[in-house]
Amino acid sequence: MIQSLTSEQIAIVLEANLTGKADGPLVSQIVIDSRNILQPENALFVALKGAKFDGHDFIEEIHALGVNVFLVSTHYKIPSKISKSAIFIQVEDTKQALQKLAAYQRHLFQGPLIGITGSNGKTIIKEWLGQILGQQYAVAKSPKSYNSQVGVPLSVFGIEAGHQLAIMEAGISRPQEMEKLANILKPQLGIFANIGTAHEEGFDSMEQKLAEKAKLFESCRFIIYRKEHAKIGQHLISVFESEKLVSWSDGIGADYVLTVKKEEDKSKILLIRPDMSVFTFHVPFTDEASLENIRHVITAALTLGMDPKLIQEGLNHLKAVDMRLTLKPGVNQSLIIDDTYNNDLAGLRLALDFMAAQRPKKRKILIISDLLQIGDISQVYEEVQKLLNYHNIDFLIGVGEDIGSLQGRLGFGSQFYRDTEELLRNLDLEFFDNDLILVTGARKFGFEAIVNLLQQRIHGTTLEINLNALTHNYNFFKTKLLPQTKVMVMVKAFAYGGGAAEIANHLQQLKADYLAVAYTDEGVALRKEGIRLPIMVLNPVQESFIHLQQYDLEPVVYSPPFFRELAKFCHVQQTVMKVHLDLDTGMHRLGFEEQHIADLLELIQKYPQLQIGSLYTHLVGADEEIHHDFTVGQLKLFMSMADEIVSKLDYVPLRHALNSAGIIRFPEYQLDMVRLGIGLYGVEVSGRFDSHLKPISTLKTTISQIKSLSKGDTIGYSRKGVMDQAGRIATIAIGYADGYDRRFSNGKGYVLIHGKKAPVIGNVCMDMAMIDISGLDEIKEGDEVVIYGPTISLKELAERIGTIPYELLTNISSRVKRVYYLD
């Protein structure tokens, strides 16, 4: 924060009621999550209500951590036991109050603020511009993609008194949101990146979305845009004075002409300025998206008066990398958190928070470079030291001149090196063993070389899991449920191919109520990885009874004989085990039928060692309208059977029947709990809310080799592929042993390279497949190939070969490396 405030000052700013003890502390930190409280004695906790939980529910817990100042709703009933030891600032709407307080802090900042909006590229433009301007100014930036109604205020609170310039991004998903963000940020310089289809469902038209986004710039002195984006230009010209508009273009007629000449792995950008002077920039990429983003950056830096030579110095350290936190398998059973572009305190805080949320390992190791922030160096590293102690780091490896100031001041082991090359020469891979390793550094240090060295050497094809998309999908389904309805999440079959341990850990962070696995060994593996949530085992066997007991797993019981066997085991072991009863209402797979109920009730009375945790049934066709009446019949039969069982118990088990499709189609039957499966992973099988879910996984591989072939040449086994005309094919590093279905052979399947379709030609092999890239330009060996993901519908691919998305997801081989990230 730019200025610390007393509780009384905050109450005045917010025009709020103040209750509680007098003489409160100065507030210098605003938090909305108990995991981010670094200095509780100086923190204000803002209780926000979201889809997952209500912050008011955690106030007593957070007060116990040492926080004494709370921003709460006027509807919140203050607990008597903390009413005299804490301060409560009461407002009608805590989110609006958070925004109002952020607007006040923004008013105190005297330096220029750059506001960025658009559909794509906002975060990359912000990060690159921050690195360029950071050579001359102490820069504050939005952490990652903090651009929402809550993210923007939190970003503003990250501006400190020593910052000279701020760069903030703003994103909206519906009308009337941007006014709130614009009122907070009030930027002097604006960048309109582009306009695309993201969040289109929230607006009546593309024109409405464009007009809403442009509201960010009402306070701007200058607004930067690309002239080729005609709709953006037309709108800006119609709304703003021409003196405010700064255009750039490939051709003449703009304020800045930035012409690109591509080379093999780099590009030249020829700048012709308004005064007709010329300068050539050199950038290390050739793809169109990066070239557009970097020209926004160059134009903004020039508009701020930065010397082109200094801009080029900054460009020398840029690379076309994903701006995201990524979790990767490492050597000796370690896990690596890749944050190899970060260079400021705000990013370090987020990376350490992400580290804290991962499943436990033997040690927490941080590999970090100098933080390239102009300002008070001693104050920056004093803050770093506090962060490391708060997050219980076990070992630090520092690279650079400034980070060495921590030497001798840490209460744990450390090593320091002058540069990355010296570290690489001395890095002993045997030092790492089952550790959690955060690698975070400024671009100039080239820390990707460290990540490459530490990564587990396995198959090059990767399955990327977007944890933010998973969170989005989980929250979407939560909005369809009553607050009291519990959520059991299916993580069987390696979490639908995504990797059970990491996904289960993320669900634990999201406060899911239950997990479900198919077999006992899956549950045992999760327990060994530190997963504490209750786990239901769908298909237990007698041989696994001892493991069910040992690892506190809850088996499904589906027949009288199985009930007896498990009950006898528990009797011999003198233990009580929670179980779940599967009631067969029409699936006719496993489960107690109506005629079994009498026997079941006798067994429950006879064997109290088995405590009934829940009663449930499987719906046969909840995703299809044609089966509506049958599904309703199943649900009514289940209710009848469950009522009969519960009437004989002196306790009430949970009841659950709805799967992902059932949550959408039959919300009136959500009962006590629902079972969320394929919907969590981004597939909405009923088709009603496809656009509301996000695919969480992207399967990628690379081009191994490119061949030029003549008309009539054949490709692959049995010569099934035939060239209709002369052209080129590419061999990609994925086959049916990786889970790429052989039915995609001979044109049934296709992949994307640089966003362009390339059909499969010939038969899919065990470890490779061939694709036809005839007519596709600028494709080379080593290029990335997308098999499926946000840009290729999994449902469409499944339909092409007559299967279902479940099969494609669960078929991905364990030899395919899973990579997890927050975008």
Image: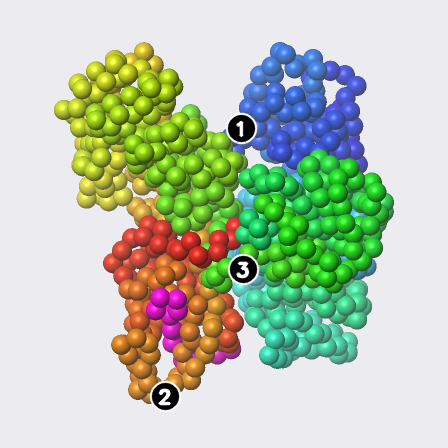
- Give the residues in magenta: 765-778
Task: Please state which of residues 690 and 552 is positioned toward the viewer in this rendering.
Answer: 552
Q: Residue furthest left?
A: 595
Residue at 37% of width from left, 52% of height from top? 809
Q: Nearer the viewer, mark 2 or mark 1?
A: 2
Gap in Å between the C-alphas at discs 1 and 3?
Answer: 43 Å
User: Vertically, is 205 above or below 731?
Assistant: above
Marks 2/3: CA–CA distance: 37 Å
Tell me: 407 left or right of 514: right
The residue indicated by pointer 3 is 457
Tell me, yes or no, whether the highlighted magenta stretch contains residue 3. Answer: no
Q: Is residue 770 magenta?
A: yes
Which quarter of the picture shows residue 564? Answer: top left
Q: On the image, numbered disc 2 is attached to which residue?
A: 710
> Disc 2 or 3, which lies upstream in sequence?
3
Question: Magenta segment, principal secondary structure?
Answer: loop
Horizontal and vertical percent for residue 744?
31, 65
Q: Quickly name the residue at label 1.
A: 54
Residue 138 numbered tag: none
Rendered position, 233 above or below 818? below
Pointers 2 and 1 in contact (C-beta within 8 Å): no
User: What's under tag 2, amino acid-wise?
Assistant: Ser
Left or right: where does residue 30 sit relative to residue 684?
A: right
First-in-chain label (2 vs 1):
1
Toward the viewer: 804 or 247? 804
> Which of the marked residues, 1 or 3, is nearer the chain's N terminus?
1
Q: Amino acid at mark 3?
A: Arg
* In this rendering, position of residue 751 left or right of residue 566: right
Q: Residue at horizontal 77%, vertical 49%?
A: 415
At 58% from the left edge and 56% from the top edge, which residue is drawn? 455
